[in-house]
Image (spheres, rainbow, N blue to C red):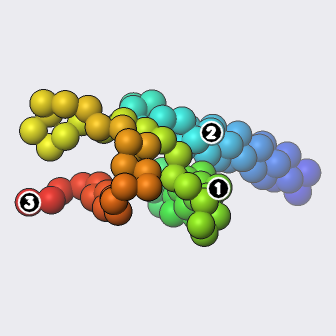
Amino acid sequence: MRRFLKFAILVLAVYLVLLGGLYAAMLQPPVVFGRVMAKLPTLAFLVFPFEPMWLMARRGHLKVGEAAPNFDLKTADGSQTVELSSFRGKEPVVLIFGSHT
């Protein structure tokens, strides 16, 4: 019984360390997180609670009515870079992330 308890504590400790490492990776920029995900075995998707961790890691801190943080994006044709703040007070802006085809 004692041996089983020690083994269970060891497995739990390893699980928590891996869980913390995965959550820390989710807080990183997408390029870093993508490298981690590329090396993750498929079994990990069954063992770790990905969706709740992802939603917590990427929830953001904006409140309704607050201005969006400023950022730069390339235009669809890649010919120029546009800064979000350049539209402030002029016209509404719609951001589409993903495929627009």
- Find the residue positioned furthest to the bottom: 64
Quadrant (top left/top right/bottom left/bottom right) for the C terminus: bottom left
Q: Is residue 91 left or right of residue 23?
A: left
Where disc 3 sits, the SS reads loop
Is residue 21 something that shows in the picture? Answer: yes
**Looking at the picture, which amino acid does disc 3 mark?**
Thr
- Find the residue positioned furthest to the right: 2
Q: Nearer the viewer, mark 2 or mark 3?
A: 3
Q: Nearer the viewer, mark 2 or mark 1?
A: 1
The x, y position of residue 35, in whole percent, is 39, 31
In the picture shown, does residue 61 fall above or below 33? below
Is residue 18 something that shows in the picture? Answer: no
User: What is the CA distance from the residue labelled 2 to the residue labelled 3?
Assistant: 34 Å
The x, y position of residue 41, in whole percent, is 41, 43
Where disc 1 sits, the SS reads loop
Where disc 2 sits, the SS reads helix
Q: Earlier in the sequence, mark 3 or mark 1?
A: 1
Quadrant (top left/top right/bottom left/bottom right) for the N terminus: bottom right
| Mark 2 lies on residue | 24
| Mark 1 lies on residue | 61
The x, y position of residue 8, in whole percent, is 78, 52
| Mark 3 lies on residue | 101
Q: Residue at x 60, y 60 (%)?
A: 66
Between 78 and 10, the one nearer to me in the picture: 78
In the picture shown, does residue 86 fall above or below 50? above
